[in-house]
Image (cartoon, helix red, strand yellow):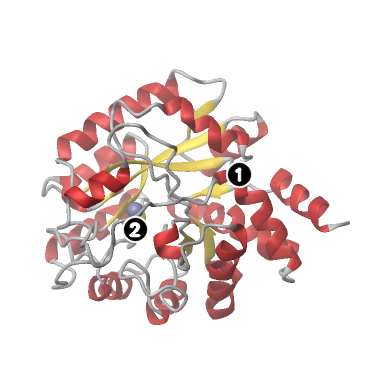
């Protein structure tokens, strides 16, 4: 079979998994844009409902609004709570949706909020969002490490079955989280620093520590984190290959962080307005450009052309996260 045919077969048989959306978590977001993922052949998307810049009650409101929208469009979308649900969604041509939260300010200091969010459809939560918070350190802040509160949250996340996610988190805290927990830890959307020296990207020892927990690193599709101001599929493949060479293809996934074009509240305007979250030296003025969900097919082709096996490409595009969800979600 030729490369295009092999890529097509992978997209047909595997659950294509995008571990993180990048559009603004706002109750007014136009979710008809979710068709971009469906049309691209993506089968599962984790939709961001909040991050540490926003007050915790805004996250609750966005979660309520997004849940309501997804449940109101049952022919195209399915709010899933298990791997079996995801398989059912794919079989019926629907995009499976769960939610994620970027940073533990959304807990408002209450460990009890973990189960509340889980029951509402949240399946992964990041420790911090660039700045430090009550749980631990952010990647663009002074990182004083994992706190007692953070440890209690990990215990609760493990109990209810939520992915512990350390993207956007400070180096020391990520290492302490991975040391503390006995469950797999993920970086849902982080790239290797070796290929792009951005402060949001992660070092080889973070990548190795993540794989040792049984976790997965999702490659993120923003030009700022891919380097060379590129978002093409060859560049995505460079990051995938680097990770696969370092820790094996079973620990690599995709978390594109794609945002559809928005007219008001453009992400670059927000970045500029909040240098405390996006320091100007790390986020120089300029346009944020995104790899698109429609590149999944081309990415599969590029990886196959570079010699990765069908099994490896299938795992990277979704099989790995699916396996981990079966292991962790309850
Ligand atoms: Zn993010």
Q: Quadrant of residue 25?
A: top left
Classify mark 2: helix, strand or loop.
Answer: strand
Badges 1 and 2: C-beta atoms under 8 Å apart? no
Relative depth, front residue between 237 and 132: 237
Tell me if 28 is positioned left or right of 223 in this view: left
Q: Is residue 190 among the parts visible in the rendering?
A: no
Residue 37 percent coordinates (x, y) = 55, 38
Q: Position of residue 272 (x, y in %)?
A: 22, 51
Instruction: Identify the residue position indicated by label 2 in the image.
Output: 164
| SS at circle 1 | helix
Q: Quadrant of residue 249?
A: bottom right
Residue depicted at x 44% and y 56%: 222
Residue 18 marker: none
Determine the residue positioned at 46% across, 63% down. Answer: 229
Mark 2 Cα within 10 Å, few/some/many (few <14, many 20+)?
A: many
The x, y position of residue 197, in whole percent, is 38, 75
Residue shown at the point (44%, 54%) measured from the top left: 328
Q: Residue furthest right?
A: 1
Q: Nearer the viewer, residue 88 or 200?
A: 200
Vertical order, 244 against 69 (above or below): below
Q: Residue at x 47, y 50 (%)?
A: 290
* Position in image of residue 9 (x %, y %): 77, 49
- Residue 274 shows in this picture: yes
Q: CA distance from mark 1 to mark 2?
A: 28 Å
Of pointers 1 and 2, the one earlier in the residue sequence: 2
Camera-side mark, 1 or 2:
1
Q: Which residue is mark 1?
A: 294
Residue 165 quadrant: bottom left
């Amino acid at each position: 079979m030729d490369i295009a045919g092999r890529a097509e077969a992978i997209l047909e048989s595997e659950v294509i998994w995008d571990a993180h959306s990048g559009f603004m978590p706002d109750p007014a977001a136009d979710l008809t844009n979710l068709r971009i993922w469906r049309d691209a052949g993506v089968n599962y998307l984790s939709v961001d409902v909040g991050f540490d810049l926003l007050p915790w009650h805004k996250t609750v409101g966005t979660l309520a609004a997004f849940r309501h929208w997804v449940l109101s469009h049952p022919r195209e979308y399915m709010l899933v709570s298990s791997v079996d649900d995801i398989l059912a969604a794919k079989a019926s041509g629907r995009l499976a949706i769960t939610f994620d939260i970027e940073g533990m300010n959304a807990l408002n200091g209450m460990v009890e909020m973990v189960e509340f969010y889980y029951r509402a459809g949240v399946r992964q939560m990041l420790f911090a969002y660039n700045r430090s918070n009550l749980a631990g350190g952010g990647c663009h802040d002074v990182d004083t490490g994992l706190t007692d509160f953070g440890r209690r949250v990990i215990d609760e996340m493990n109990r209810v079955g939520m992915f512990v996610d350390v993207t956007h988190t400070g180096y020391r805290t990520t290492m302490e989280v991975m040391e503390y927990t006995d469950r797999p830890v993920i970086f849902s959307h982080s790239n290797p620093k070796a290929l792009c020296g951005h402060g949001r990207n992660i070092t080889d020892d973070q990548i190795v520590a993540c794989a040792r927990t049984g976790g997965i690193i999702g490659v993120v599709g923003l030009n700022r984190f891919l380097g060379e101001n590129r978002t093409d599929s060859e560049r995505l493949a460079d990051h995938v290959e680097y990770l696969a060479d370092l820790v094996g293809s079973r620990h690599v996934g995709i978390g594109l962080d794609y945002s559809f074009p928005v007219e008001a509240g453009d992400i670059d305007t927000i970045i500029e307005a909040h240098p405390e979250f996006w320091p100007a030296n790390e986020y120089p003025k300029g346009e944020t450009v995104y790899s698109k969900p429609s590149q999944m097919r081309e990415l599969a082709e590029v990886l196959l052309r570079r010699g990765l096996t069908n099994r490896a490409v299938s795992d990277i595009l979704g099989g790995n996260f699916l396996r981990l969800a079966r292991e962790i979600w309850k």
